[in-house]
Image: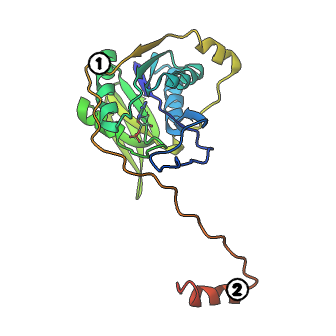
C-alpha cells in the first residue's frame, strides 16, 4: 500500500511570533522554520506502517516555496521514500491546498493519506476534511490510534466527550492528533541518505489548479500583553482578593 503524507513548512513552534511593524502580516524575516508538528506525527505514523510491513511506499508532499524542500528532506530522512514539492510563493489557502492534493491523489492513487490535524501557523484545521470532500474518500480526523486490517482502517478519534472509533474503507484519509505517536529524530546517516532520494517539483499551473484568494488578510496584531501576577501570603488574602477584587466568588 502506498501512503501519501503531507508536510507543511511553518514557523518553528519554539519561536516567539513577531508581527510586522505595519501590522500587515506575521514577520517571517530571519525566523527559524520547521515541519509543522502534526505533520511530524503524520510522517512517523507512515514510517511505523512501513516498518510493520503494511505500507510499501511513502510519498511526502509539501506545497509552498522552494525552501519547503527542507521539510521534504527531513521527512525523507525520517523514512519517506520520495518527495513531491508543489512550488508556489503565493499564500495557499486550505481549499487551494486541498484541490492541489486532490490532483496528487489522482496521480499517485495512495491507499492512505495522512495529514496533520492542523497547521500551527494558521490553525485552520480544514485541509484534511476538504480533501475528503473533494476526493470522496472517507476520513478519520483527530486520530490517536490507527489500525489497518486488510482494506479497512480502524481510527480512534479524540472527540470532545472522549474517544470514538470509526472504521473506514480504504483508500482513506487520516488527520493526526497529538497522542497518535511520538516522532523520532532523524539520524545523521539517514539525513545524508535523504539527499539522494528523489524529489520532484511541480507547479499549480501544471496540475491545472488556479491559485485563487477567497479571503483577504486585513490586519495582524499581537495579543494584548498579560499583566504580571501577584503572590498572596495567605489563603485568607487569596479569598479576600477573589471576593472583592476579582469578584469571582
Ligand atoms: P490546515 O487545514 O491548514 O490547518 O492544515 C492541516 C494539515 O494539512 C497540515 O497539518 C498539513 O499536513 C496539511 N497541509 C496544509 N497546508 C499544507 C501545505 N502548504 N503543504 C503541505 N501540507 C499542508
Above or below, 232 against 167 in this view is below
Which quarter of the rendered image does ligand 1 occupy? Answer: top left
Residue mark closest to the camera, 1 vs 2: 1
| Residue on which disc 2 sits | 235
Label 2 secondary element? helix
Above or below, 53 against 114 in this view is above
- Tell me the CA gap for discs 1 and 2: 65 Å
| Residue on which disc 1 sits | 207
- In percent of width and height, residue 213 lies at 29, 37
Q: What is the number of callouts on the image?
A: 2
Q: Look at the numbered disc 1 and say if its residue's Cβ is closer than 8 Å to ligand 1.
A: no
Return the residue nearer the eye: 74 or 68.
68
Return the residue nearer the eye: 135 or 169.
135
Left or right of residue 185: residue 208: left
Label 1 secondary element? loop
Residue in the picture at 59% in, 66% down: 226
* Residue 138 visible at all: no
The quadrant of the image that shows the N terminus is top left
Q: Are marks 1 and 2 in contact (CB under 8 Å)?
A: no
Which residue is most to the right? Answer: 233
Amino acid at each position: 500500500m502506498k501512503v501519501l503524507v503531507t508536510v507543511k513548512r511553518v514557523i518553528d513552534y519554539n519561536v516567539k511570533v513577531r508581527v510586522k511593524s505595519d501590522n500587515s502580516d506575521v514577520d517571517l524575516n530571519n525566523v527559524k522554520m520547521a515541519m509543522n508538528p502534526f505533520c511530524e506525527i503524520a510522517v512517523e505514523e507512515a514510517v511505523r506502517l512501513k516498518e510493520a510491513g503494511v505500507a510499501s511506499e511513502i510519498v511526502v508532499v509539501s506545497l509552498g516555496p522552494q525552501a519547503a524542500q527542507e521539510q521534504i528532506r527531513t521527512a525523507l530522512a525520517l523514512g519517506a521514500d520520495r518527495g513531491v514539492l508543489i512550488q508556489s510563493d503565493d499564500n495557499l489557502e486550505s481549499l487551494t491546498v486541498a484541490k492541489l492534493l486532490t490532483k496528487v491523489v489522482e496521480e499517485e492513487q495512495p491507499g492512505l493519506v495522512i495529514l496533520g490535524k492542523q497547521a500551527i501557523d494558521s490553525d485552520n484545521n480544514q485541509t484534511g476534511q476538504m480533501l475528503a470532500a473533494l476526493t470522496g474518500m472517507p476520513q478519520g480526523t483527530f486520530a490517536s490510534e490507527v489500525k489497518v486490517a486488510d482494506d479497512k482502517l480502524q481510527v480512534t478519534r479524540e472527540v470532545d466527550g472522549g474517544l470514538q472509533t470509526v472504521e473506514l474503507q480504504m483508500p482513506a484519509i487520516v488527520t493526526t492528533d497529538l497522542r497518535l505517536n511520538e516522532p523520532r529524530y532523524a539520524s545523521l546517516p539517514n539525513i545524508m541518505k535523504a539527499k539522494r532520494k528523489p524529489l520532484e517539483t511541480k507547479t499549480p499551473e501544471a496540475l491545472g489548479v488556479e491559485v485563487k484568494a477567497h479571503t483577504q488578510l486585513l490586519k495582524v496584531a499581537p495579543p494584548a500583553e498579560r499583566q504580571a501576577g501577584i503572590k498572596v501570603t495567605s489563603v485568607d488574602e487569596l479569598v479576600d482578593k477573589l471576593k472583592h477584587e476579582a469578584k469571582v466568588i
